[in-house]
Image (spheres, helix red, strand yellow):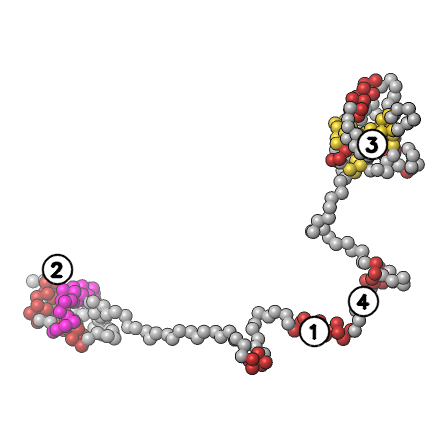
């Protein structure tokens, strides 16, 4: 060691803690440019003369390696000081360094601790909490600066307040506000278009078969838009249907009157669909159609 005392060197203490072990864990060779070592560990290593295999191994590894511009070998031997691999395990690197002398240059063996490589700062790294030096005075400390101590702005305070007020007044707002001056200048104002006019409710298309009277004989409301001729023809068909049903014993009090009336009325109106809207129906044709429908659905008691 050249620069530090033995008791204050971490590497020397770590090696001393390995005393008594028969061997250390060899982890292979490592390129010096790929790792970071502690430059303060100025520790040289000596090989015992009786350790012939160790001497031959290091001579083949280090003496045959190329030298970097700083006089060190490009490769080194990586050794772990411990039985496990973890963050607390100390790893060392044994490398060669040129040693110039008066006669011939020689290679000395050095040992250094492997340290975690420092990375470049990233944008997501937290900012340092230490305040800038220009905010601290001789009579102020960090504690006094954080203890509700306001920093006075340089320059005119009214100018600072005026600028802050201007910024707050010109903040973007979700609601569009038009000032009086803008109206006078004729600025474009966004107008909400009016809703389209609602169309009047059209009457539904008239039923082909017309309205059906209920059990009590009350006719439903007549749909708007049906012609007078069609309405008159449907009324005649209803009266004829009721008269012929009563003739075969199906009065309005009959439990099946509503269903039978609907079938006969709709069938007759559908059969006369081509003339019911244009001209009065023939009484003979109406009587024939109603009787034919009643024969299909009603069995005569006689």
Residue 37 visible to an observer of this rendering: yes
Q: Mark 2 highlights which residue?
A: 296
Q: Residue at x 57, y 69 (%)?
A: 174
Q: CA distance from mark 3 to mark 2?
A: 121 Å
Mark 3 and mark 1: Cα distance apart in space: 65 Å
Residue 221 has which mark? none
Residue at left offset 44%, top offset 75%: 194
Compared to residue 138, the image places residue 100 above or below, namely above
Q: Are marks 3 and 1 in contact (CB under 8 Å)?
A: no
For image coordinates 52% across by 75% down, the residue present is 188
Mark positioned earlier in the residue sequence (3 or 1): 3
Q: Which residue is mark 3?
A: 71
Confirm whether residue 82 shows in the render: no
| Residue at image mark 4 | 151
Q: Position of residue 298 (x, y in %)?
A: 13, 61
10 Å crowding of disc 1: few (<14), some (14-19), many (20+): few
Closest to the observer, 124 or 248: 124
**Left or right position of 239 against 186:** left
Relative to 35, residue 245 above or below = below
How far apart are the alpha carbons under marks 2 and 4?
A: 105 Å
Q: Nearer the viewer, residue 198 or 168?
A: 168
State the image coordinates of residue 24 (x, y, percent, origin top left).
80, 26
**In this picture, which residue range is highlighted in magenta?**
254-280
Q: 10 Å neighbourhood of mark 3: few (<14), some, or many (≥20)?
A: few
Of badges 3 and 1, nearer the viewer stands 3
Please rate how many residues cluster around mark 4, counting C-alpha atoms within 10 Å: few if below 14, some from 14 to 19, many from 20: few
Front position among marks 2 and 4: 4
| Mark earlier in primary sequence (2, 1) | 1
């Amino acid at each position: 060691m050249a620069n530090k005392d033995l008791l204050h060197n971490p590497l020397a203490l770590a090696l001393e803690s390995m005393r008594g072990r028969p061997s250390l864990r060899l982890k292979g060779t490592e390129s010096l440019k790929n790792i970071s070592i502690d430059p303060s560990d100025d520790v040289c290593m000596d090989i015992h003369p009786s350790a012939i295999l160790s001497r031959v191994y290091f001579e083949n590894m280090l003496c045959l390696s190329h030298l970097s511009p700083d006089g060190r070998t490009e490769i080194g031997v990586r050794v772990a000081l411990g039985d496990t691999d973890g963050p607390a395990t100390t790893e060392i690197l044994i490398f060669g360094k040129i040693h110039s002398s008066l006669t011939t240059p020689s290679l000395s063996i050095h040992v250094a601790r492997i340290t975690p490589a420092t990375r470049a700062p990233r944008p997501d790294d937290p900012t340092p909490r230490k305040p800038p030096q220009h905010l601290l005075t001789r009579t102020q400390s960090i504690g006094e600066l954080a203890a509700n101590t306001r920093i006075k702005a340089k320059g005119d305070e009214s100018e600072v307040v005026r600028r802050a007020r201007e910024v707050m007044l010109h903040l973007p707002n979700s609601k569009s506000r038009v000032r009086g001056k803008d109206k006078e200048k004729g600025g474009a104002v966004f107008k909400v278009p009016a809703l389209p006019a609602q169309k009047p409710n059209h009457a539904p298309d008239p039923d082909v078969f017309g309205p059906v009277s209920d059990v009590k004989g009350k006719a439903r409301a007549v749909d708007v838009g049906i012609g007078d001729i069609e309405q008159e023809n449907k009324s005649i068909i209803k009266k004829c249907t009721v008269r012929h049903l009563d003739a075969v014993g199906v009065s309005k009090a009959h439990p099946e009157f509503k269903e039978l009336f609907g079938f006969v009325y709709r069938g007759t109106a559908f059969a006369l669909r081509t003339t019911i809207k244009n001209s009065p129906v023939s009484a003979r044709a109406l009587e024939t159609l109603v009787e034919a429908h009643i024969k299909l659905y009603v069995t005569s008691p006689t």
